[in-house]
Amino acid sequence: MIKLLIVDDHLVVRSGLTMLLNGKNNIEVVGEAADGDEAIRQAQKLQPDVILMDLSMPHGKGGLEATSEIKQKAPEISILVLTMHDDDEYLFNAIHAGASGYILKSSPHEELLEAIQSVATGNAYLNPTATKRLMSEYMGNLKDGGNSKSFETLSQREKEVLEWIAKGYSNKEIAENLIISVKTVETHKSNIMEKLQFKTRPELVKYALKKGLLNFD
């Protein structure tokens, strides 16, 4: 049997998934959790084979933080993200946090069953759209070696500023945390964009993720 823990902040969603999945394809739903903190506790207590993890949970820890912490404490547990977010940044962050799979809530239930079985056996699972985006991103990285080399030209302070930018902090907040002026932050940001040949903040976020500058501690 595949022991499954369902994590979602909506009771009706958890109940519906339990009714849909329990007893199907050797799946046994052993527990539910309404937020990331409860998911971590239940993972330690129940030791499921697979956790079906929502990302957006307003109370307590979110799905990304919970995924990262669970994988650190129990790397043998496979985590399948089930979300409404069909977005590159969510996808890349989930994989970086340690998720074995990523599937949309709009997917057919047959695909969800397939995804659970796949990650339970140690394989990865991505829906076709996500796979295409990842492959496109990978091929783009192969073609563009410049950014990788350019990273080495960043100063230690610029790397620190890049990390803070990628985590979503404003220039003022970065200045306060690094004890420098806002003008200095702006200068560092301008230098980073020029050296890495980027023009937008989302490009910096994706780049920082690939370079391992983001974590969920």
Image (cartoon, rainbow, N blue to C red):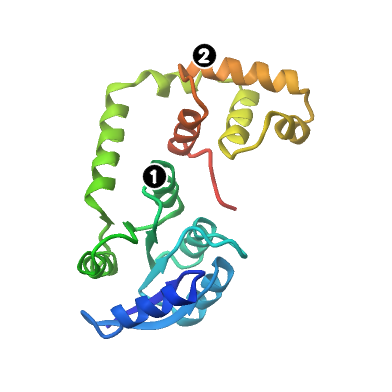
Local packing at callout 1 (Cα closer than 10 Å; few below 14, some 14-19, many 20+) is: few
**Secondary-structure class at tag 2:** helix
Q: Nearer the viewer, residue 132 or 47?
A: 132
Location of mark 1 (residue): 87
Q: Is residue 189 left or right of residue 120?
A: right
Q: Nearer the viewer, residue 132 or 67?
A: 132
Location of mark 2 (residue): 194
Q: CA distance from mark 1 to mark 2?
A: 26 Å
Picture coordinates of residue 175, whole percent (x, y): 75, 29
Quadrant (top left/top right/bottom left/bottom right) for the N terminus: bottom left
Picture coordinates of residue 140, whole percent (x, y): 29, 27
Q: Quadrant of residue 76?
A: bottom left
Q: Amino acid at mark 1?
A: Asp
Q: Pick whichever of labels 1 and 2 is earlier in the sequence.
A: 1
Say if 88 sits above or below 55 in the image: above
Say if 6 sits above or below 181 in the image: below
Picture coordinates of residue 195, whole percent (x, y): 50, 15
- Label for residue 8? none
In percent of the image, x 43 and y 47: which residue is there?
Answer: 90
**Secondary-structure class at tag 1:** loop
Q: Amino acid at mark 2?
A: Glu
- Tag in front: 1 or 2: 1
Tag 1 and tag 2, C-beta contact below 8 Å: no
